[in-house]
Image: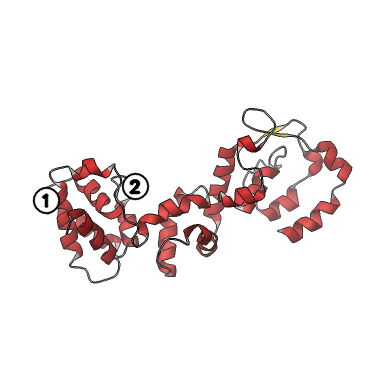
Amino acid sequence: HGAELKEVVPLIEVSELKKRARQILGEDRQKLSKRHGATSLHEFKEKGFLPEALINYLSLLGWSHSEGKEILSFEELVHNFDIYKLHPSPAVFDPQKLKWMNAVHLRGLDHEELWRRLQPFLKDLQLPQDPVWRDRALHVLKTSMETLTDAPALFRPFAKGAFALEDSSKAVLSWESSRSVIKEWHQQLESFSQDFLTEEDFLTIQNHIKKECQVKGKFLFMPIRVAVLGKPHGAELKEVVPLIEVSELKKRARQILGD
């Protein structure tokens, strides 16, 4: 938005800007400095903050929309922002409020644009590039993102060659029924020839394992989740399983079974 800013800034009287400019304080009420975290636009970009979210947040440090709106587009800010209505008292920079605002702006991006912005953070992961897969994955995962830097950890379980067991899985794998559950999971996967399971396919397999192995609750869900994600806790299995290729799911199950 550099072009728009170049048009707006000269319209502000420098003397008025200096007169009304206030200090921005950290949460400890001390003048904002490097010890409070990122201090440059480049640093905020590297930390995964969207430019529009940062502009939105900074505009509200000492100014309020006439209708109390907090989430504002750049166009709305240009139309509504009034330097003569800045509050005189110092403003406190709240990193958590900025993260919340960033998450709202992030979720407001269409999937194609969000995927484009995520690429610098996901470039090292071998993820499917199919637009249908992309849209399904973003639908499931974007609500868990506050900044773009959250993406690698969220997407890593869906990348080829990235499967790893977390220490928290050991207790689940020690349960007497876990091996039979994972073995049956692998056996059921062998009967599918398509690249990905549907949600319905997964629920059918899950119900079969429940009956075949006589397990339910955590003794059903956690061993399967460990075989899928390498950890006993996480997103709904019916949402994440369709995002991983069947060949990869089988490979992960065999890795746990030692086959």
| Residue 252 in the figure: left or right of residue 18 | left
Instruction: Tell me if mark 2 has few (under 14), some (14-19) or many (20+) residues whose alpha carbon lies within 10 angstroms of its own.
Output: few
In-front residue for pair 153/142 = 153
Q: Position of residue 49 (x, y in %)?
A: 58, 50
- The answer to which quarter of the image holds residue 26 is top right
In-front residue for pair 13/68 = 13
Residue on which disc 1 sits: 213
Residue 208 shows in this picture? no
**Residues marked 1 and 2 touching at CB (< 8 Å):** no
| Residue 126 in the figure: left or right of residue 212 | right
The residue at the point 26 percent across, 66 percent down is 247
Residue on which disc 2 sits: 234
Secondary element type, mark 1: helix
In-front residue for pair 13/126 = 126
Q: Position of residue 106 (x, y in %)?
A: 54, 53
Residue type at tag 1: Cys
Vertical placement of residue 214 versus 96, above or below: below
The residue at the point 32 percent across, 56 percent down is 163
Vertical placement of residue 170 versus 110, above or below: above
- In this rendering, the count of numbered labels is 2
How many angstroms separate mark 1 from mark 2 (CA)?
A: 23 Å
Secondary element type, mark 2: loop
